[in-house]
Image: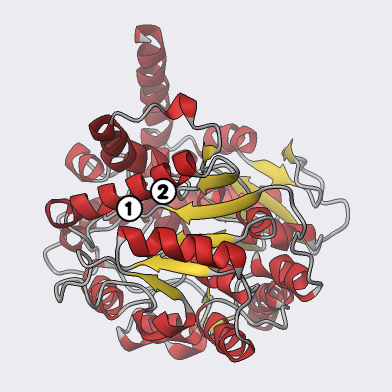
Amino acid sequence: MQMKEIFKALRKTLFGIAVSNRWYNLIVIIYLFAIKELTSNGKINHLSLRNRNNKLTILVFSPRAFRKDLDCIVTTNEFRVLIIQDHWLSIITGQFYPADFLRYHFFISLKYRTYLNPNSTDFKYKKQQKELRGFLCEFLSKLYRFLCIDCVISPHHRYVPDMEWGAVSTKIGVPHILVNREGQMASSPYLIKKLKRLFRDALPKFEGNHIIIQNELDKQIYVDTGYVSPEKISSLGCPRMDDFIKTRNEKKRSTGKSRKKVVFFPFFWFSDFEKKDLFSYFCKLHLCLVDFAIHHPEIDVIMKPKQGCFLSWKKNIFDETVINSNVDLSKIPNLIISDELDLHSLFFESDVVCGLNSSALLEAAVIGLPVIIPYFKDLQNRKYEERVFYRDAYDLFDIAESVEGLESLILKRLQNPVIDRGIMERRGAYFEKHISSLRGGATEKHVALIKRVVLGQQSKRVSYK
């Protein structure tokens, strides 16, 4: 471990020497090894300097932050798609910003904070930002020219390195498109207010060419706060929903299975729910599902935490629940806990879904699954009334107000899973409002807009010449 740290420090020092001496060509060569190429069949290959089919070339920043939306775009085979991981963007940023700036962002992908907004008059690092952008201007010009980059894409409005690279890319004539990996900004009144404060006060205004988001509700938040002008943002749906919707329309849900499946989507309080207020609620809920698995060994109970939150959820909620109850998990083979299961495949194999504050509930609802929301009395608190997702549509789901109510509803829905046709129609409309069109086509819309932005930029270059 010590040798690994020594090697890491040495690498950083040598890289710092190259940056401080402005050895641009050497750094470009290093980054040619860091950049990989995605193929339409899902493979990650070493970079090929030849663009064999003369396609438009996209460089994607921080690809791990994307969900399956990027894969959908790659699969169309319309672009040559190159990727560069977030640490390769951060290592250059770290050469210019001081240690206290970087320390504030440790473990959180160098995110902007209210007190670190470059647009604010008291931003302490204006000189460092100017030097960083000056370096990137020269470095990216050489790198992009060598790789024939036509466009760059980033996944999130809060990632400092991505947005700095994107701003400079735009300045040197390579369009930057933000394809926001997060949706559901308007899923609760509390979240709307929180994000409006974020876009208004904590984030520098968008300096790229275009933003693509899922729905018109989210678009309004970006525009109302002045983060981006209306002509630079489009709501095009969610590409990863296209295949899901196609499968849904073909009615491929499994029937006649030998074992029933109940799926629970754990949720974490983060900053929206206080642990001291609701820890007993979380414990009761999780223990209820564990007890259900114990008492019904013929039924599989699947807990699927959100990827990225698994360790926090397990340590802070599930493990404490299990320890306090003296449950032996090894004796509950029908209790399955995993964050790696494919969500959409799981839906088409399941019988009942349970959870709170997750867009997965809308996805389950739109294919006709019974969806139970554990809205226990503990949570029915005025303090949290505006923090619960989709509260205006609770009549589309089954609501459990207690542990006993939850167990009773699960058993009832396993026996009678049919959802009223009128409810299904309203579920479909709500899904379209918050996630994506039930006609599909989100992927094609993304491809068309990317091409339009790139070709528009190229035509400007020609007219300028």
Q: Residue at x 53, y 39 (%)?
A: 336
Q: Quadrant of residue 328?
A: top left
Residue type pointed to by label 1: Leu
* Residue at mark 1: 285
The answer to whether any part of residue 19 appears in the image is: yes
Q: Quadrant of residue 98?
A: top left
> How far apart are the two marked residues, 2 and 1, measured between alpha carbons?
7 Å
Q: Are marks 2 and 1 in contact (CB under 8 Å)?
A: yes
Q: Position of residue 243 (x, y in %)?
A: 74, 66
Q: Residue at x 50, y 51 (%)?
A: 65
The answer to whether any part of residue 137 appears in the image is: no
* Residue at mark 2: 289
**Secondary-structure class at tag 1:** helix
Neighbours of disc 2 within 10 Å: few (<14), some (14-19), many (20+): many
Neighbours of disc 1 within 10 Å: few (<14), some (14-19), many (20+): many
Q: Residue at x 65, y 64 (%)?
A: 240
Left or right, 443 with respect to 307, comes to right
Residue 247 vs 427, above or below: the answer is: above
